Image (cartoon, rainbow, N blue to C red):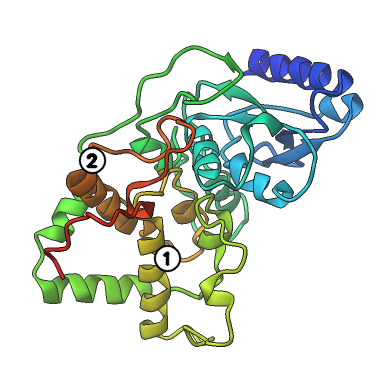
């Protein structure tokens, strides 16, 4: 990946020097081999710190929300899932295409720095590091879908078996079994909101769960409030989740959040599809559940 790192540096320096962008978003290396973190270069000297390696897993498209009300033009490096996040922001009218210079990288799959960090923390038993992060084992789009220039060889999808296999297992449970499964899974939630913060589709300016008048959920992490939070958040993602998997990856208590998201992805595709969120940018297009027509069928009411 060293060649790709050098090419990204060249592109960043050219864009910053020519004034085509004011900020270039990529990654830089930290103190440890597994510590690769988001980095915003603002001049050619800072661009020398840019790197792309097997731990460049963070979805940078979410960082664009910090600049949605500002005038800067931004260069950004995206993998396949990151690029679907760009499409999500454009369709949600959170960013303007003309403000972006997108450098796509065909992604061979990433390693999870959080797993590596735990292995090197000295706490708990070390586990054998896997070649791919869990979220990359069900990646259907490793190649960017929107870009101004592209780097690297075209990659095959990293799907291992049926993408919805676990969803079908849950669907085959009885209602009581399903309730017990989700009650147990969501009872672990500490309501840190890491899943919300890392999600590119959670781009509301004021989140419903930050409201105090009215207060939709309590501040304590009870089972009922946890289920309220996760099921409402998931329903807001219906037709909008780009399957970057960052929500599940950063969850400190390992809640299977993508299981819920994939159930909704499967249903939206079945009822409104064929449809996959963020797979192509068409100006003016919006997700299925964001569309209303007066002649929509209402037999379910």
Residue drawn at (77%, 15%) of the image:
10
Q: Is residue 143 above or below residue 65?
A: above
Task: Give me the C-alpha separation between circle 1 and circle 2.
Answer: 22 Å
The answer to whether 11 appears left or right of 226 in the picture is right
In this view, the residue in front, 134 or 277, is 277
Q: Are marks 1 and 2 in contact (CB under 8 Å)?
A: no
Label 2 crowd bin: few (<14), some (14–19), many (20+), radius 10 Å? few
Q: Position of residue 300 (x, y in %)?
A: 13, 66
Asked whether residue 203 is in view, the answer is yes
Residue 238 place in picture, x, y as percent: 34, 55
Q: Which residue is mark 2?
A: 273
**Residue 55 position by quadrant:** top right
Badge 1 element: helix
Q: Which image quadrant: the N terminus? A: top right
Whether residue 187 is visible, yes or no, is no
Q: Which mark, residue 233?
A: 1
Q: Nearer the viewer, mark 1 or mark 2?
A: 2
Spot occupied by residue 71 in the image (x, y as percentages of width and height) = 80, 42
Against 197, residue 38 (above or below) is: above
Quadrant where the C terminus sits is: bottom left
Residue 159, above or below 203 = above
Relative depth, front residue between 280 and 218: 280
With 55 as the anchor, is 87 left or right in this view? left
């Amino acid at each position: 990946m060293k060649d790709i790192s050098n090419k990204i540096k060249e592109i960043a320096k050219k864009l910053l020097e020519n004034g085509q962008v004011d900020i270039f978003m990529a990654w830089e290396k930290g103190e440890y081999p597994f510590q690769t973190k988001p980095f915003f270069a603002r001049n050619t000297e800072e661009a020398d710190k840019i790197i792309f390696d097997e731990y460049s897993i963070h979805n940078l498209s979410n960082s664009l929300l910090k600049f949605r009300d500002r005038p800067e033009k931004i260069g950004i490096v995206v993998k396949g899932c990151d690029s679907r996040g760009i499409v999500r922001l454009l369709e949600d009218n959170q960013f303007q295409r003309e403000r972006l210079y997108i450098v796509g990288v065909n992604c061979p799959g990433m390693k999870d720095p959080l797993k590596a960090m735990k292995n090197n923390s000295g706490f708990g038993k070390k586990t054998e590091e896997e070649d791919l992060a869990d979220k990359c084992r069900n990646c259907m789009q490793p190649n960017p879908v929107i870009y101004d220039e592209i780097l690297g060889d075209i990659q095959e999808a990293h799907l291992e078996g049926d993408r919805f296999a676990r969803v079908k297992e849950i669907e085959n449970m009885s209602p009581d079994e399903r309730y017990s499964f989700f009650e147990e899974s969501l009872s672990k939630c500490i309501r840190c909101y890491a899943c919300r913060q890392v999600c590119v589709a959670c781009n509301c300016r004021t989140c419903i769960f930050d409201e105090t008048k009215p207060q939709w959920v309590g501040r304590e992490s009870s089972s009922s409030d946890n289920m309220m939070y996760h099921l409402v958040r998931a329903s807001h993602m219906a037709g909008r989740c780009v399957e970057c998997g960052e929500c599940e990856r950063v969850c400190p208590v390992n809640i299977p959040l993508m299981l819920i998201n994939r159930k909704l992805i499967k249903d939206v595709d079945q009822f409104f599809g064929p449809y996959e969120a963020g797979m192509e940018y068409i100006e003016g297009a919006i997700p299925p559940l964001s569309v209303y027509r007066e002649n929509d069928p209402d037999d379910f009411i």
